[in-house]
Amino acid sequence: MTTPTNEAFRRAIKGHVTRWINNIQQYDNVQMDLTVHNLVLGAESNLRNMYNKYKRLSEGVARDMQQAEATQDQFEAEIDSQIQIEEDVGDALIIVKRKREEFKEIQAAEERKRQEETLLLMFKTQQIAADAARAQEKADQDAARAQEKADQDAARAQEKIDQDAARAQERAIRQQENLDQQNLFRQLIAAIPAAAAPGAPAAPAAVASTKLPKRQIKPFKGDVLEWTAFWEGYNAAVHGSAIPAVQKFGYLKDYLKGEAQLCVENLELTDANYTVAITLLKARYGKPDVLIEAHTHKLDTLQPVKDVADTAALRCFQLTIQSHINALETLGVARASHGCLLGSRILRSIPLKLQAERAKSATNKSKLKSQSDSAV
């Protein structure tokens, strides 16, 4: 029969060490009480005993390895194993120390609570005697506060009247500014002559068939302003369909070009990555603040129209502005928040003749207002 070696004994002891380490770790997030405290201390005692045995057997294992002329790699592996066990034991003992301190804090808190309850009982007894005196004092204070509150209410009422008057004046100013802005657009539209019809309107082409053509999805190249149209078309045609997600991902990659394609280029064609790709694209192109910034930038970079006789350019200019304003209002940006700034941009971009008409209209309104104020 073969005599057990130090290594065989040590493996058995190491199993006990590991078991007690795990036993301690299970109490790491457990609320401490007396029972848990005693269990942790018992586990600590057993762990220390087993670890001391493990260290003694490790010394024997080291001697056995020297006698067996073990290699350097074997010695280093043995050292690494002992260091790992030592670190695991150390971590477990740190948990024990923390749980001890936690239990001490719980006991201290319970003692403080008992003392506080005793003091609270004493204070309540004293307060009962003082309540009668405070009641009379409170009655006097309430009368004084009532008078003070009446004075404050009167002051606040007057302040509110003044604030309401100021707000009414501010609203009137904003309404006038909005009216001026609307008049500016009316002047711009009125300045555009109607295109002369070259002849009788062409009769509508006869419908050859009631079957509608298949709708094509325009590839998305990364222009933020084209994202909403692309997504609605793609959602209706592909995303909302019942085909597998991986197949949808294949279609999505086919419809993405340029910068947009780079966002998903390195994602493998899997069901999970399809969801990731949609999330990335919406985060980059579909956020309201991104769309608002894009529309605002377009308004900032309007191409001016210099020739009042250029009907097509004026019509395109007006439709472009209206399109971006409608888009901003759809995104929750009120026209009043950008009306004045937009008006100044339009004035700089329209022909000088229209600017002169705008200035003339503003001068007339100013004169009428002055006359009205003088009459009052």
Image (spheres, rainbow, N blue to C red):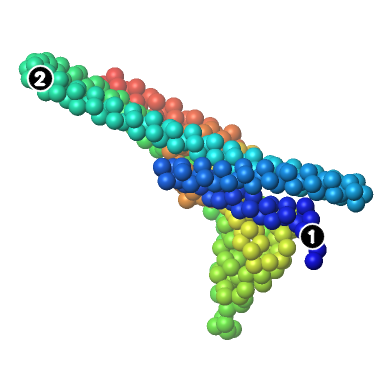
Amino acid at dot 2: Ala
Residue at 79 percent across and 56 percent down: it is: 5
Instruction: Specify which label sits upstream in the sequence, 2 or 1.
Output: 1
Location of the N terminus by quadrant is: bottom right
Q: Position of residue 177 (x, y in %)?
A: 41, 33
Q: Position of residue 310 (x, y in %)?
A: 63, 46
The numbered mark at residue 231 is: none
Q: Which residue is mark 2?
A: 129
The residue closer to the viewer here, 244 or 289, is 244
Q: Determine if residue 199 is in view.
A: no
Amino acid at dot 1: Thr
Residue at 34 percent across and 22 percent down: it is: 370
Residue at 64 percent across and 67 percent down: it is: 271
Direction from residue 211 to residue 5 in the image, left or right: right
The residue closer to the viewer here, 11 or 255, is 11
Q: Which residue is mark 1?
A: 3
* Mark count: 2
Q: Position of residue 8 (x, y in %)?
A: 75, 57
The residue closer to the viewer here, 339 or 241, is 241
